[in-house]
Amino acid sequence: MKTVLLTGFEPFNGATINPAWEAVRALDGWRGEHFMVEVRQLPCVFGQAIEDLVAMIDELHPDVVIAVGQAGGRPDISVERVAINVDDASIRDNGGQQPVDAAIAADGPAAYFSTLPIKAIVRALRQKGLVAGVSQTAGTFVCNHVFYGLMHHAAELPQPVKAGFIHVPFLPEQAAVRQGAPPSMALEDIIAGIKLAVEVTVSVEHDVHETGGATH
Ligand code: PCA
């Protein structure tokens, strides 16, 4: 039985809802034939978010970790390829911090690649009619920060952990109150996408290597 840790961020930047958390918390207690899912919330706070995630991993010893965050303005479920070693915030986090051009790990590599089967996930999502793509940037705010911290910790663990990050769009009710009608996705579609990402990750041994997966 594999353990899958799914995390979602709390709302940030004055919002009252985060689609990542709404989707992830709907999967609390979900089990498949060969896996069980543990769901946790992460604070949108530099430093603390990585500390919390590392503690969760050390407690649960998951085989798979998928962290999920909101990427408002993106139209697709973005399966992130790469985490980079920099914090460069254009807004404050929920603790009032706004790091600029700061390394996440002073002695860490410039970047880590996701170890999720990113192309296989995108293919499966598209086959279900969900708007999805590989993304080449998770930004430089708390999501990239957590993604980098996750991969940095996973790289040090004795057991192999498949780990990565997925960004999800606004919900329709978030888009409705914003200027310029940004794209959005129904909660049920975001949930279906995260479920598929889990199922593909636990069942696929090697990623597929095909072109056309990227959107960002
Ligand atoms: N999205 C932000 C941080 C928390 C979240 O859900 C980001 O993309 O960095």
Image (cartoon, rainbow, N blue to C red):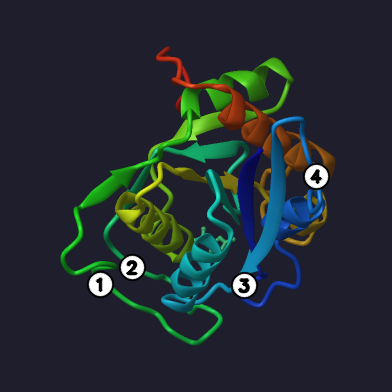
| Inter-mark Cα distance, 3 to 2 | 16 Å
Q: Nearer the viewer, residue 6 or 14?
A: 6
Q: Distance between the residues labelled 1 and 4?
A: 38 Å
Dot 3 or dot 2, earlier in sequence: 3
Q: Earlier in the sequence, mark 1 or mark 4?
A: 4
Say which mark, if any, is on residue 124: none
Q: Which residue is tagged 4?
A: 30
The amino acid marked with disc number 1 is Ala
Q: Mark 1 points at which residue?
A: 102
Q: In this view, does 93 lie to the left or right of 84?
A: right
Can you identify the residue that label 2 sits on?
88
Examine the rendered structure and indicate whether residue 189 appears above or below residue 171: above
Decide: few, some or many residues near mark 3? Use Cα within 10 Å; few <14, some 14-19, many ≥20.
some
User: Where in the image, quadrant-wise, is ligand 1 located?
Assistant: bottom right
What residue sits 50% from the left and 70% below the top? 55
* Crowd class of label 2 (few under 14; some 14 to 19; many from 20; radius 10 Å): some
Give the residue displayed 45% in from the left and 27% down from the top: 214
Q: Can residue 191 be seen in this view?
A: yes
Find numbered disc 3 in the image and state the secondary structure of the residue it sits on.
Answer: loop
Q: Residue at x 40, y 40 (%)?
A: 114
